[in-house]
Amino acid sequence: MEQVPSVGRFVQITVTDGYDLKGSKGDTPVTFVRAEFNQVVLGDSAKITVSPEGTGKYNFTCSFEFNPEGGITLDDLARKPVFLTVTEVLPKERRQKEEKTLILGQAVVDLLPLLAGECSFETTVPLHPVQGSPLETPRLGAKQCSLEVKVFATEILLTPVQMAGGNLLKVTLEAAYSVPETFVPTGTVQNYMVGLQVPSFGEKDYPILFKNGTLNGNHAEAKACYERTISFVVDASGMHFIFLRLGLLYLEEKEYEKAKKTYLQACKRSPSCLTWLGLGIACYRLEELTEAEDALSEANALNNYSAEVWAYLALVCLKAGRQLEAEQAYKYTIKLKLKDEALLEEIHMVQEMVGFGNPSF
């Protein structure tokens, strides 16, 4: 991301109120908020007594300095949120020397609006209970606990020209479903990976991997992540995407047997043009022409406007020696403007090899 030449701008974080709070020792606990950013504690609020209705009036302000030439940079603002931790101060017992506390929950504040041309914004962020917190059992009829937060920058951090020339990507992992028992946070703290795929340029998709919050373009790790997901999850929704991405990785790595198996599972669970196309490609590469044609015909029935499906049908017909059908499939491939130059070159090579299939010969 392009850096801004000026220096010395402060970003203020103000926590005004907390809502639907409760403690372990009665309905009016004494609490405080701690703010952290970039692994640095920005400060603690005063100790505030929560009202019987669950409201805490914190009016707590802290700040940090944004300096693109060193310290906190634009990348930090883009990748790292502000952490707000609400802690209960427990009543002192007899002969107790040190004050005891109990963490109730934690909230995060995304600073991305500051990179979208805003100098200030207000937001209400959910306060997520920690394990064992009294907030895990909400008050009767109460909403989820939350914090009211205001963010203010002394001046704009990015000019309109810089924003127009940027390519900021926001990825949020909201939840995980059908989580294996080994993921339960007991004992040693563990870190996990999340794999996903996005278009990086043009028509081509590239897998990317976030490991412990850090971008990693390692295909092997992404593949392992998808494989573990499929092995753990049985009936979770949303697996269609995982099968498609893993199958594509297998095709790119020329692991055609694994690609075939993966796309077969996808066709059984949630068949689509893409799952049948993937299966057809894998079978074609394995020289299983009958199975390839069956799969590609299913894909074509679901979407007969796919140039790639017609392209592989042309290849199957060429290899099977069926001239009329090969020429017909090729015509549709050209008409629908196949964008995969390498695949088009492969068709031309096979046409020359068998001596037919291109009406322009």
Image: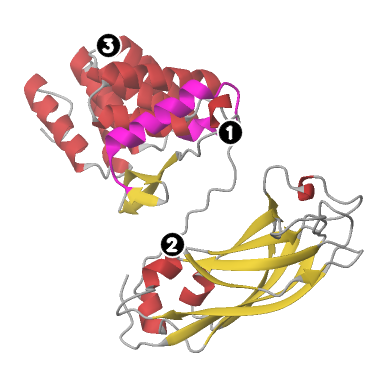
Which residues lie in the magenta part? 216-241
Q: Is residue 221 left or right of residue 298?
A: left
User: Which quadrant holds the C terminus?
Assistant: top left
Name the residue beneath numbered marker 1: 186
Label 2 or label 3, whichever comes before in sequence order:
2
Q: Is residue 327 left or right of residue 248?
A: left
Give coordinates of residue 291: x percent, y percent.
Answer: 34, 12
Q: Amino acid at mark 2?
A: Arg
Name the residue: 54% across, 21% down.
269
Q: Is residue 319 left or right of residue 91?
A: left
Name the residue beneath numbered marker 2: 79
- Secondary structure beneath label 1: loop
Name the residue beneath numbered marker 3: 288
Toward the viewer: 306 or 179?
179
Name the residue: 36% across, 87% down.
7
Name the residue: 28% across, 28% down.
251
Q: CA distance from mark 1 to mark 2?
A: 27 Å
